[in-house]
Structure formats: C-alpha cells, structure tokens
Amino acid sequence: MMGGDMERSSGAIQNTQNKAEILKWGFGDINFNVCRVQYDKKQELAEGVKNWAFYEKQVTTMREIRAINPDILFFATLRSDYDGYGNDNNLPDWICNYNTKAIEVAKYGVFLADYVEYMEQQGVPIAMMSVAKEWTTFVNATVSAGVITKLKSELDARGVAMPLISDQGFWSTAQGNKYLDDVASLGTEDLYWSFCNHNYGTSDHSLWHGINAKALALGKVLYNDESSHGGGGPTSGVERPITTPIAAYVERCHMYEAGVKGEIFFEIWSRGLNNETRPIYCPWGGTGRKMRAYYIMKHFANHVVDSCYFPSEASDMPGVHTMAFRKNDQVVLWVINEGDAGHSSVSVNLDSSLSGLEIDETVWTEEGDLEGVCETIIGSGTGFQVDIAAQSISCFLFDIEAQEARKLPYYEGFESGFGEWKQVQDDDFDWSRNVFATGTSGSGPSSASQGDWYLYAEGHNANAPDYEALLEKRFDLSDVSGAELRFDYHMCGAYIDHLAVDVYDGAEWVEGVWIREGAQQAMSEDPWHRAIVDLSDYAGLSEVTVRFRTKKSVWHASDVAVDNILFAEPPQTLPYAESFENGLGGWAQSAEDDIDWSHHTGGTATTNTGPSGSSDGDWYLYVENHSNGAYYKSASVEGRFDLSTAVHPELTFDYHMFGPYIDFLSVDVHSGSEWHLDVWKKSGQQQSSNEDDWATARVGLSAFAGNDLVTIRFRSKQRQWHAADTAIDAIQLVDTATPYELWAEASFGSERESVDWSEMGNPDGDHFTNLEEWALVLDPMASDSPEMAFSAQGELFTVNYVRRVGSGLRVRATWSSSLGSGTWKGHGDGFVESSQGVEGDVEFMSASVPLESGRKFIRIEVD
C-alpha cells in the first residue's frame, strides 16, 4: 500500500483555482495505489433521514481522481475529529450513546453498508475500510467484530462487494497493542484483512516492532494509514526547516525495518485553512503550489510502491539512517543524516556488481533546491562512493545487473522474497508476497503450501475486470535432456478466470502449455493442488522464460496463488543404476553445501585417504577435502526419483571411507515436504587403507513409497581439511516388493490405508481371500467370481479361464461326471488342460473333456 490522504480535504480542493493541476500532482504524477477518504456522521444524523448531498464534493473529487488513475483504491475511515478536536459524538446519537459509550452494533453495520453501497452506485467503490478511526474507547474489538459481521451480511444481501477491513487507524501504538490483544482473545482475526496504526504521541521508534509482531501473530500485516510527510504545520505556506522532513523519514526507516508493509501520506494538500501548510499548499480559493515535502514524497512513493523492502545499514556513522527497496532489477536506497556533521567518501556496498553502472543521486538539504539536487555517480565493483551532507536526505536509484538465466535444478518457496521472479511491466496489476490468508473473503488460500510465504495476485485491489498479472523468470536448459516444472497452486474465488503457464523459447511465446480455468478449490482452507508440467520440448535451449499468468473476471474474490516451485529434470524411475562412467548421471551438486563432489578415476591425490580405484567400472564420485583448507565442511550431491509405483524401494550403494579426518557419510531423503536426515549414516573411518574393499550399504526406503518425487542426498562431512576423502559408487535403486505386493499396490492404491490388503484379507466380502483374488485375476475391491467361458464343440466340452503365473498357489481345472465328493480329478477319460499363451503375468488356460460317455462337469480349483 502506498497512498495519499484527503479525508478532510476532498471538499476544499473544489474551491482552488488550479484543481485539475493539483489532482494530477497528487494522483497522476505520483503512483499512489490508494486514496484515503472518510465517512461522516452527517450522512444520517436523524435515523432514516439520509443526507447523501453531504458527500457531493467528496464524490466529485473521487471521480476526478479515478479519471486520472483508474486503478486507484479508496480506503474509507471514520471522521473522528468531532471527539478528537472537540467534545462531540463522532457517530450519530441514534447509533452511539456518547455518555455511556454504548454502540448500536447492528445499526452501525447498516450505516456503513449504506455508505459502501452509495459509493459503489456513484462509480467510486470502497475497496478498504476501517470500522472506525482512533476511537477504540467506543468502538473496541468486541464492537468491531459485531459491526463487521453485520456489514458483511448487509452487503451480501444487497449484492455489494465487501471492502477489505483494515482496523483501526490507532492513534498510538499502546492503543493498537490493546486492540490487537483483544482481537487475539476473541479469536476474531479472520474478520480483518490487515491492521493500521499512526503511532502519534511518542518518539520511541522501537514500538513499531512490537505492534507489527502482534499483527503477524494474528496472521495479518500492518500499515501506517497516516504517515508524516514532513511538510505540515501552521506556517501559511512557508517552508518547514529540513529537520522536519528528516524526522519524518527517520521514522520511516524504523517503520519499514520493523516490517510495516506500506503507508498513506497524511493530507497531501491543504484543507482550506490559509495558515495550514502541506506538501501541496493551497489557501482557500487560491492557487496551489508544490513544496519541498511534495518532491521528497513523490520521489519516495514512485520508487517504493510495489517494491520489496530489504535490510540495509550504516556503519560507524552516528545519526545516519538507511532504508532500501527493490522492484525487479531496480534498487532505491535512502540515506537520512539527522546529524550536524557530514561524511565524506562513504562506501556503499551491495552483493551485486555495479561496475560501470549509473547511479542517480538526489539530495535535499536546507539550502538546496526544493526538487533536490541531482547528480550521476558511476559504480565500481560492487558499490560506489558518495558524500553524505549534514542534515540531509539522499536518494540513490540504480539498476543492478540482471540475474543470469538459472540452471536446473531450481527451487523457490518465497520464504526470503520473490526469488528472482520478476513482475512484468506491461500487465495490469502485480503479484504480491503474502503470509497467512489474503484477506479477501471467499478467495485465496488460508496459508502457504509449504513454509510461511507464498505469492498471489490480489484481485480485490485491481479495480477493473479482465485484468491480468504476469510473473516470469529466465532459465538455462542447455545442459539437460528433459525438464519438468512442478508447483503448488490455489485457486479459490468465484471470479477467477484462469491461471496459466507460458513459455518463451527465445523466439516466441507459447501460451497455455498448462492452464486451469475457474475456481479449483471451494474454500480457502482446501489443500493446495500440485501441477506437473512437462517442458522437455525446451531442453537444450540456453534461454527459456517461464511465465505465470493469471486473469480475473471481476475485481473481487479472484486471488490466485502459487508456491513450492521446483524446476528440474524429470525424476529417475525404478529400477535405477548409476556407476558414473559418463559423468554424474542424474545426480547434481547441492547449492547448500560448502564444497563439491568430484568425478574421478584411479586413486585420489591425497595420501592416506580415499580408494585406490572404483568399485564398479572405472569412475566414481568422491569428496576431495585436501584443497578446501577448512574444518567441518560438507559436500552434498542429490538425485530425484519417482517412487509412486514402488512398494518397498531399496537403495544400495558402495562406499569407501578411508581417512582419519572423515566425520561422516549420510543419506538424507526429502519426501516432497521435508528433509529426513540420517536415514543411513556411518561416522568416522570405515576402511583402513586405500586397497581395502569397498563396503556395500542397503537402505530401505519403504517409508517414502508412493511419492512421485523423492530427493535422495549423499552428504559427506570432514573434521579437518586433510585425509578425509569419502567416495561412493555403484548406486542402485530397486523395488524389492514381492509380486503380490506390487499387485496389491496397483489394486488397492490409496485404499490400502483403510482396508485389510494382506494375503488373507477379504475387503470385498466375497468367498476369496486377497491371495486367491490375485491368483484368479479378480478385483479385490468388488465381489466377483472367476470368468469361465464354456463351449461344446463336436464331442468336446471346453472351459477357458485365466490364472496368475507365479502366484504360489495351484490354480487348475478338474472334472467330474457326478459332482459327488471325491469324484473330481485332473486326468483320465480324455481330459486335457493346456496353456493358450501368456501376457505379462497372466496365463490363458483351456480345459476340455469328451462328451461321449455322459454328463461332464469342469471346475477351477485353487489350493
């Protein structure tokens, strides 16, 4: 959120000489996405007597702002000045008893619903709302819960969209903390989209941390809905000293560092009082003009809106404060020096190369131009040098070098940011990073698929229908033979149009290689779905762009989310074998270790460690620790496997661990949701010389059977940098399940968790055990009998049937002439049984007996 406030000044601007120019300055030249307005008790002072004419000037101004910025969102709060600057009721007396503080909750909810409906009818819908503002002594958390509930039911009945609730514009952090504690006690946090706070009346910046932590604990973010621009005061248009905006932007440094997610600049133009200075000063009926605070505010908002805050700090410079933001490849760094001393040749350092890049610097000081003094600096290496003037505000704007196309495998769960995914500039609205629920009722997930954070497209904030949000990232697929994109998605919302994956192959976009249309989940609490997209057609290309594209049909309830992205070669299937004769095979170096494994033949270079040669063939993998010069360093190599059809998967491999400084070798397994460490582990030296035979390990992986993506990791660690060469070779992964277990897996599937699928089980309740069903090629989940085809051709009576090969049971045909006990036999009187062929493990049988000697009967026996 990055907005401008006009709650008390929407009418005054209608009387200025240059109204159109002022509106453009405020909401055209500045990329605000929110405008704060107010609802007022004068809407209905007497119950049932509506006074919509009261809002005439406000509606006119809102329409004019929306004409300038069609995407603007209106955020409505209560006019609280009646009690704030006087001793009068902020609400109509028929809603609030000013003496007892009693609130007619249902009536207040209807009052607010009337306002929201009226504004929608005027073409200026309210997207966000506080149930009050600053007035928690009257409208506490209990009252708010009732009002919000009534407001929603009223709007639902009228077919009007419910605004996002961001309560309550607390005057002070202490007031806010009390309210949030009460919300937690009541358990009403699901009624709110977010919370907002002013933090007036204290200079203790650390209080932002406490209240933001309370909001996060409730699963909500915190905004400052009334932040200072540093340009206000009763100076009749005379500039405030530079120390005033410096103080405001020092507060911003602390506010964003604490985790606040956005703000609304308080009263960006005057409200008709001639002595009242604001960033745009406009006396009653006069001509407005821009002040220094306007230029700083404009520069800040335009380069911070829709960006992500990231940490920065000033070392050894007392009185200097910093804050930094990034949007795609653009970084903006603010340096505020409230001290009386300047600092020369200050080094600014980043993690990315800035060599030769231009850095745009804008500086505001007491003596400088109102618009700031601009200069261009050339970066060198990973930074640049600047002079920081005493009592100054400096802004540095630059683009960092674009990230190289990422090689596979690639994973992103958005726990630390957007993970190199870029917002596309020519779409209609942006994706957002979020924790917990999105806040729009009836839309979005209730939490992340994994971890805490995910990305989503907030359809509620994009006012127009048929808007699209695009997100993309570049990849290098030149060294892979196949590619598979996996991600989790959540599509709860009545107005979702679609979510699609598009691919750019370097020449053209291929749209909709994967697509889902409409809602895919019925509720926010429904589990995420997993998408698997085969992109092997693009394997071998050095630059491939993957794009997520979502579209909404209307502006409400259309929050599409993605999380848990994995882009890698398709997982290996069973049976699998690798002896590293042609490289690493399907194994990849881990990005989260200290050193890499080496592909090698013969003995290792370090004496008194490692094998003298491979276990199988000529090549193997090992960790060369002699050259890394450090202690307790680890090396990991990973492979991905599809165990979806396995019942008892087993990993075998040969290992050689000769070296006194080996710490351990372990096998870890990622189940698709979490790592299971040390599924197998050997600590210390296991061989006593290079010439000793390799050892063989067997690791049962039945706990991971059924998973379509399992990552196996070999992790080696040394205690010091010499004589710690661990080696692996001859890896195999097979399913050791019996034929019956493989059949049971295919036949019962997920039902195995709820039925008796053992050999002697009988879940379908017929006359056959599971083992007999298997032997007779029957369905164990349906009451059935063996299929027998009878025929009489000439003098022969013939029966055809099927049986399972290798079942361990004897399945055969016998005959009788009387059906009597002891009369059944499998030979004699011309009886013949023969195989007609085999398909897989099913054998087709035929049994026949002559009819010349009277009646004959044939049956199938299992024993």
Image: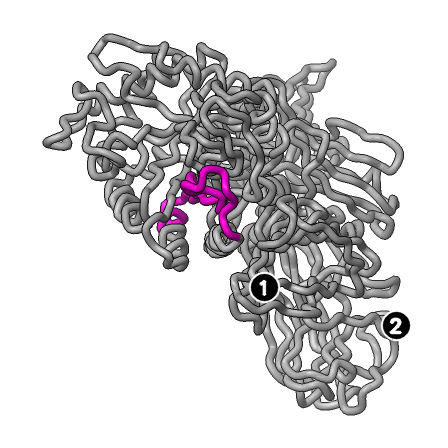
Which residue is label 1 attached to?
Answer: 390
Can you give x and y, in whole percent of width and height, for residue 456 in the image?
A: 56, 36
Q: Is residue 73 left or right of residue 566?
A: left
| Rendering quarter of residue 666 | bottom right
Element class at badge 2: loop
Which region is colored magenta?
214-241
Measured in 3D between alpha carbons, the distance from the residue under mark 2 to the one under mark 1, in whole angstroms, is 69 Å
Image quadrant where one finds the C terminus: top right
Q: Is residue 753 magenta?
A: no
Look at label 2 and name its amino acid.
Answer: Asp
CA neighbours of label 1 inside 10 A, class few (<14), some (14 to 19), many (20+): some
Q: Is residue 631 above or below residue 71?
A: below
Left or right for 391, reference 838 = left
Per the image, the residue denoted by label 2 is 618
Residue in view at x 45 percent, y 44 percent:
228
| Label 2 packing within 10 angstroms: few (<14), some (14-19), many (20+) | some
Q: Position of residue 678 (x, y in %)?
A: 56, 68
Residue, x 60% and y 50% (percent of image)? 417
Query: Between tags 2 and 1, which lies in front?
Result: 1
Circle 1 — which element? loop
Q: Is residue 4 depicted above or below 347 in this figure?
A: above
Residue in view at x 64 percent, y 67 percent: 698
Q: Name the magenta segment's main secondary structure.
A: loop
Residue 231 colored in magenta in the image: yes
| 4 horizontally vs 698: left or right | left
Whether residue 411 is visible, yes or no, is no
Q: Amino acid at mark 1?
A: Ala
Residue 801, given in percent of the width and then of the height, sits at 65, 28
